Amino acid sequence: MNLLNSSSGNKRRELGFLILYAAAFYAFIIHRSLQLSRDHYLKLFGLRPGWLLPHRLNDVSDAQWRNFQGNLPVLTIVFTLFTLIANLLRTSFHLKARGMSIIWILISFTYLSYLHGACIIFILSIASVNFLLVKIFARTKYFSFVFWIFNIFFLLCNRVYEGYSFSMIGQRWAYLDNFRGTFRWHICFNFVVLRMISFGYDYHWAHRDSRFDHKKHIQRCDICKSGKTCYQSLQERGVQNDKFSFMTYLSYLVYAPLYLAGPIVSFNAFASQLDVPQNNLSARDIAWYGLRWVFSLLLMELMTHLFYYNAFAISGMWKELHPMDVFIIGYGVLIFMWLKFFLIWRYFRFWSLICGIEVPENMPRCINNCYNLETFWKNWHASYNKWLVRYLYIPLGGTRRKLLNVWVVFTFVAIWHDLEWKLLSWAWLTCLFFIPEMILKSAVNAFQVESTHGEFVVRELSAVAGAITITCLMVANLVGFVIGPSGISWLISQFLNREGLPVLAGMLLTFYVGTKLMFHIRDAKQSSR
């Protein structure tokens, strides 16, 4: 009993110290970030007059965020109009899967006509051939080979030929190149490829005995216990054969709320909810979800008005800074990226929820609460992670070939994003960092802790490993999305010289403290269950 009380007291004192350290760290980061932004703003690209704070410029250097932010008013009008039409027609005519498929095809192709103009022809052509391949080969042993070759072929060709031109087909069609819409179709088609693969495999598996034990799942799942149906159950149970029609398939591929950026929903889950709209979230839950999104948008605007992290990265100014400032900018860029994707994905998920289709949350956990690579990737673009596990990782052999599979999975992720060496470098660096983590996890799982001292040692070693992992994760993401592979040697030289080594030590100490703080958060969640 005394040992338990002593351990509990030590943990409380440790938690107090960790909170104080974290508060001091963020106070320093905020102060230094404000100073850097004030001192160097004249040399930065992508700053424009702000609207939230008077006399402050706004960092809109990120093209993706700038486009989303600029088009948000128009997008919200479209969102409202389409939602009203779809929900009104569903309620008035009691529409089920077939009827709602037709409604969403009409709505979505109106949307796509503005986005892509005549290039809809390319989308329809590739999607139609994919549908035929699935129907022809789904019950054969050649299915996976033919299916993956077809989808990867078009994934690559779309990029190489920049979405093609109609003049490639023949000069008589060249005039259609004047009607290509406002948004490049082959960028959005990356998500369509994921949906085509999901449809193909869900149809392929529909003709096999399901390994999903629904009774066992209900015993473990709080949502299903309450009489509702969780996303996993919708995905794994499958749908009736008549749902695998061309109309439902097409409505799934171009479903307007999720077309531009996801989140990614499996075909089974989508088709199920066309029949019976989601009931897990009430109207009040969805309204609160939308309100929280508005608060998050204001936080993003405040951040980009005060801290010019992305502008430093875009302008290349970080090369002229002290190693400590390079760390602050690198850390700030990752926070900006997380919040940007958080807002974009939650906006489209909110739209989909109002339309009756529940999809996975893409950012279920803050970036500052992930201390290993596996946790990070389960919580960064989480719906894509679920897709990769279901349609690529498990078919490749899952945990039985984990060391090999991560290379295939991350190489696919890099190619799926774009054909760039820096993305392949990011993918392969991430795989390299994954290997020691997997080995360490296996060792820890094999090690039986039988004393308080042993538990303390494992916890400390795990915290050190977490600090190293977070550092590696920062390096991989900076290489992939900021400095490129050519900047690796420069980055290493900056942190291994006389000025950089103390910064590196402080960085590892900070991430060690951060990891210990995450352990306390994890323990608090487990004890509250």
Image (spheres, rainbow, N blue to C red):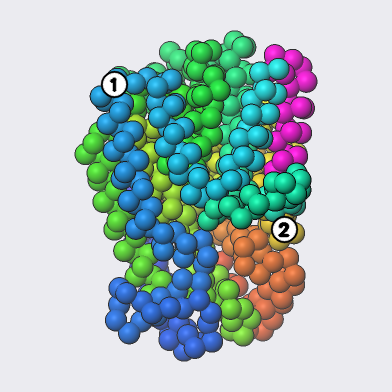
Q: Does the magenta portion include 266?
A: no
Up the image or down, 72 lies above or below 241; here it is below
Q: Position of residue 336 (x, y in %)?
A: 47, 64
Q: Quadrant of residue 103?
A: top left
Q: Position of residue 79 (x, y in %)?
A: 35, 46
Mark 1 and mark 2: Cα distance apart in space: 49 Å
Under tag 2, what secondary structure?
Answer: loop
Q: Which SS does the magenta portion mostly show?
A: helix
Q: Amino acid at mark 1?
A: Phe
Please give the residue where the numbered disc 2 appears in the rendered image.
420
Q: Residues within 10 Å of mark 1 (few under 14, many from 20)?
A: few
Task: Name the residue that disc number 1 marks.
Answer: 93
Q: Considering only vertical position in the picture, is 307 above or below 104?
A: below
Q: Measuring from the top left, give residue 448's x and y in whole percent.
A: 57, 36
Q: Pick the quarter of the image with the C terminus.
A: top left
Tell which tag, 1 or 2, sits nearer the viewer: 1
Whether residue 147 is in magenta: the answer is yes
Rendering coords of residue 486 (x, y %)? 75, 70
Name, please, the residue furthest toward the front. 172
Residue drawn at 36 percent across, 48 percent down: 78
Report the span colored magenta.
137-159
Residue at 61% x, 45% y is: 119
| Observer-nearest of 335 and 172 | 172
Q: Earlier in the sequence, mark 1 or mark 2?
A: 1
